[in-house]
Image (cartoon, grey):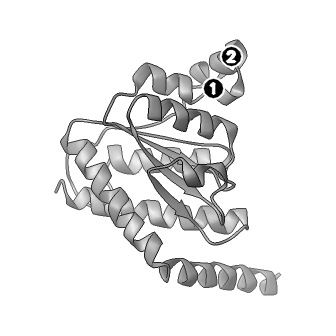
Amino acid sequence: MEHLIIERFNDAQRLLKLTAAGKEIISTIDEISKAIIKTYKDGGKVFIAGNGGSAADAQHIAAELVSRFYKERRALAAESLTVNTSNLTAIANDYDFSEIFSRQLEANGRKGDIFWGISTSGNSKNIISAIIKAKELDMRIIGFTGKDGGEMANICDFIIKIPSQDTPRIQESHILIAHIICEIVELAFV
């Protein structure tokens, strides 16, 4: 088992080095941070969604923005669309599971807000549906995906494509990048 443990650490380290070497990813992180800061300065909100582990990441990111990351500052409006079980089950039952996030955006999203969709494949139907709804509402769209970005690659304003097809390693990279974004955003409001 020690061999497996060391191998996974090495896998993660190789991917982080590869990701950090990508100039496009670095500049996109900077652009995303600036877009979120502008949204907050304009009185907007950030909505985040994903499925499975990415749903947990959506909640995690929202908590970092609403509560605090490192510094004392005002609360920043962020909402994970994965947490209201009554909304999720009603929408899935009355419409379709693919509409669980888009319907919530229709109710609460506004022009100038941000939708942040997380899908390691880039093909999650409910994330794609939410992106389409966010575009209709004139929201900005951040996408976090894996290697080729799937369908999301061509429909997001900002796309982070982790250069891997290994879901756990992609998710680990997503949360690291999200933490970097949260830190940059927080510094603008300290």
Counting from the top left corner in percent of width and height, residue 72 is at 21, 54
Counting from the top left corner in percent of width and height, residue 36 is at 31, 50
Left or right of residue 14, residue 179 in this image: left
Amino acid carrying label 2: it is Tyr
Q: Residue furthest right?
A: 1
Left or right of residue 1, residue 29 in this image: left
Rendering quarter of residue 39? top left
Counting from the top left corner in percent of width and height, residue 158 is at 44, 55
| Local SS, label 2 | loop
Amino acid carrying label 1: it is Glu
Rendering quarter of residue 87? top right
- Name the residue at 41% across, 23% down: 108
Q: Which residue is mark 1?
A: 99
- Could you say which is closer to the camera, residue 69 or residue 32? 32
Q: Which label was assigned to residue 95?
A: 2
Q: Is residue 39 above or below residue 166?
A: above
Left or right of residue 19, residue 165 in this image: right
Rendering quarter of residue 18? bottom right
